[in-house]
Image (cartoon, rainbow, N blue to C red):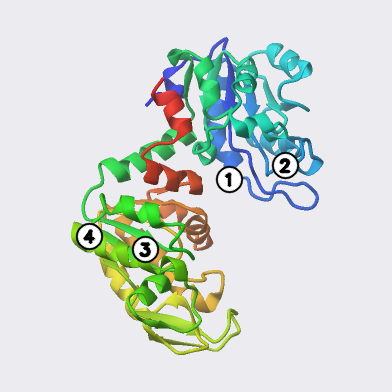
Amino acid sequence: MKTVDSINFAGQRAVIRVDFNVPLNDQFQVTDLTRIKAAIPTLKKILNDGGSIVLMSHLGRPKEGPTEKYSLRHIVSSVSEQLGTAVQFVGDCISEEAFSKSASLKAGEVVLLENLRFYKDEEKGNEAFAQKLSEHGTVYVNDAFGTAHRAHASTAVIAKFFTTEKKCFGYVMAGEVASINKVLTSAEKPFTAIIGGAKVSDKILIIEQLMNKANNILIGGGMAFTFIKALGGQIGKSLCEEDRLDIAKELIEKAKAKGVNLYLPSDAVIADNFSNDAAFKTCNIDAIPDGWMGLDIGPESVKHYGEVIKASRTILWNGPMGVFEMSNFENGTRQAAYDIVEATKTGAYSLIGGGDSVAAINKYNLSSQVSYVSTGGGALLEYIEQGSLPGVEAIEKA
């Protein structure tokens, strides 16, 4: 895998696709620096070599061109502070002013271009737009894993305008790709995938792909009730995708045919309302009374799942076990996190991926006690489903 370590950036101007799609408050202040901090080691390597940097990113989903609330000017001070270097800003990404600014950069200098998505051509993957962006640098670096599943101008198409020697991954991209490949191509057995979340429909492809890799698949979250109903269980008013019952049954049969253990919860914590203040109790997951809904896996399931997790050598976690945002229904998710940590301590490799799983591992302050926490939820899932991503192939298959 070709990373920034394979290039000496002395005298080079690196145009870098970063993922600075960060949350802002009402005063346009950055409220979570995670993505900015993640990019800093890549940027420092280039600057320490004696190179200069042109940063490209998107922010939000602007619909009608330039919009003040989506301007990257709001993050300049945060990037400057984290990098320890004054970052310049230019209010466009392909204007004459933008090209003049990038061309005049001296070694050690950094400029941030305005939001790429102010141009529709970015998301369309327009080749002419990508070529213009390529003129900002002598070397192209992709360090935006969170957008690597999109064949956008700045994430995939731009790479064709650089020779193999002049394009590479940043450390964020390299770390993400290496961690996923470790799980998908060289997983030590037993390999356990923990799949949660609300909808079966969101996870059909990932479950099918994981059946070719994993020994165990643990199902949790709202999606579990679609499986339970497909098997004839009573689920009260629990979340259920009625149009996915046949698919759920097919997934169960496919797992059997492949010799994969697909585990469903045996019990659930149920409530009479979707609220932390609701009345709640535990019952068998296939015997939920009318008017009640399952909001977490029950203690028997937590114990059983924990035994499987702690006996594993490779673990992939995507999706919570219940409504972990509510304290009465967080036990399944919290305990899964602690079980993964325990397995990691005894030598298992653990990859946490997907927005809610990352939120959960951070809620319990356990991110430093697992092997890798993926920042790109959608990209991670698509990588598992497809086996690669446009932004990865653009550099690896040049």
SS type, badge 2 = loop
At a point 44% along the width and 13% down the height, the residue shown is 165
Mark 1 and mark 3 lie on one chain; the one further toward the N terminus is 1
**Between marks 1 and 4 in the image, the one whose residue lies nearer the viewer:** 4
Image: 100 above or below 355: above
Disc 1, disc 4: CB below 8 Å?
no
From the top left corner, tell me how far across and down residue 261 is, in percent.
23, 64
Kind of residue indicated by mark 3: Ile
Q: How many marks?
A: 4
In the image, taking residue 153 as reference, residue 264 lies left or right, namely left
From the top left corner, tell me how far across and down residue 134 is, in percent.
60, 18
In the image, taking residue 34 as reference, residue 367 lies left or right, namely left
Mark sitting on residue 247: 3
SS type, badge 1 = helix
Mark 4 and mark 3 lie on one chain; the one further toward the N terminus is 3
SS type, badge 4 = loop
Label 3 Cα crowd, 10 Å radius (few <14 / some 14-19 / many 20+): some
Disc 2, disc 3: CB below 8 Å?
no
At a point 30% along the width and 63% down the height, the residue shown is 250
Give 362 or 101, whichever is nearer the viewer: 101
Determine the CA span between mark 4 and mark 3. Answer: 17 Å
Kind of residue indicated by mark 4: Val
Image: 287 above or below 123: below
At a point 42% along the width and 29% down the height, the residue shown is 393
Instruction: State the residue position of label 1.
Output: 34
Mark sitting on residue 260: 4
Mark sitting on residue 62: 2
